[in-house]
Every structure is written in structure tokens, then in C-alpha cells.
């Protein structure tokens, strides 16, 4: 059941993001473009946050980011097991990676925009 929901969500997201794409190859390519854009945005936010925090904070952020990247990749590997070997697989993986990357962007932006004195902010 979970796989059906994941695939349906992925197809809906792909249809919304690329109404002009028709073939699976085009859908896969569009998903890859979306992932690249999210990756670029993540790097920009990560670099802004790194420039703002202390040296100790930078080390902690770097370790957290490395752990998060491993988590993201392993989570998407798990979530997309049902499509391995299919032509849709790369699109489903890219959509998963993009979804988790977009969430990470939000998390890092929250740290970047923390108000002074907020004890939930790291690396200050």
C-alpha cells in the first residue's frame, strides 16, 4: 500500500512540475533537473549558515550535514525499493531526494534566520 501511495505522489508531483513532459525519459530528466536545483539551493543556504556561525558551529554543521546526506540517500534507497529495475525508478528516487533536500533547506533556513537569544539555534 505504501508503495502505491509513494508512486502516486511521485507521479502527481512530476505531472505538476513538468506538464509538458510526456515520456518516462522526459519525466526522469525533469526530476533530475528539480533535484539539481534543490541541491544548488541547499548548498547556498548551507554556505550562508556556515559563514554566520562560529568555528565550532561549522564543525558541528559539517558533521551533521554528512550524517544527513547518508540518511537522505539511505532513506530514499529504502523508500524506492519497489521500483528497482523499472524505468520509473530514477524519477522516484530523484523525487524522494528532492523532497528530503527541500525539507533540509527549510531546517537550515530556520537556523540561518534564528533570532538572537533563541536557545534552539546551533552554532552561534
Image (spheres, grey):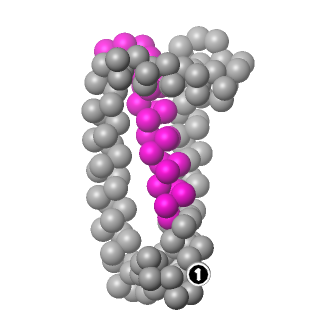
Residue 67 percent location from the top left of the image: 29, 58
Q: Residue 94, percent across and down?
A: 46, 33
Residue range highlighted in magenta: 85-108
Residue visible at 44% across and 82% down in the picture: 119
- Location of residue 54 by image quarter: bottom left
Viewer-proximal residue among 90 and 121: 121
Which of the pair 120/54 is nearer the observer? Answer: 120
**Residue farthest along the right direction in this orientation:** 20
Which residue corresponds to mark 1? 115
The residue lying at 58 percent from left, 22 percent from top is: 12
- Can I make out residue 53 in this image? no
Q: Quadrant of residue 114?
A: bottom right
Which is nearer the eye, 67 or 113?
113
Name the dominant secondary structure of the magenta segment. helix
* Horizontal and vertical percent position of residue 85: 31, 15
Q: Camera-side residue: 33 or 3?
A: 3
In reply to whether residue 107 is colored magenta, the answer given is yes
Amino acid at each position: 500500500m505504501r508503495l502505491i501511495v509513494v508512486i502516486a505522489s511521485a507521479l502527481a508531483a512530476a505531472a505538476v512540475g513538468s506538464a509538458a513532459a510526456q515520456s518516462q525519459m522526459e519525466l526522469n530528466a525533469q526530476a533530475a533537473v528539480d533535484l539539481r536545483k534543490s541541491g544548488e539551493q541547499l548548498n547556498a543556504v548551507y554556505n550562508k549558515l556556515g559563514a554566520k556561525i562560529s568555528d565550532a558551529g561549522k564543525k558541528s554543521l559539517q558533521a551533521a550535514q554528512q550524517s544527513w546526506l547518508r540518511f537522505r540517500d539511505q532513506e530514499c534507497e529504502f523508500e524506492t525499493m519497489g521500483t528497482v529495475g523499472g524505468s520509473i525508478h530514477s524519477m522516484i528516487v530523484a523525487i524522494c531526494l528532492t523532497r528530503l533536500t527541500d525539507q533540509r533547506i527549510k531546517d537550515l533556513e530556520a537556523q540561518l534566520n534564528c533570532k538572537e537569544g533563541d536557545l534552539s539555534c546551533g552554532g552561534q
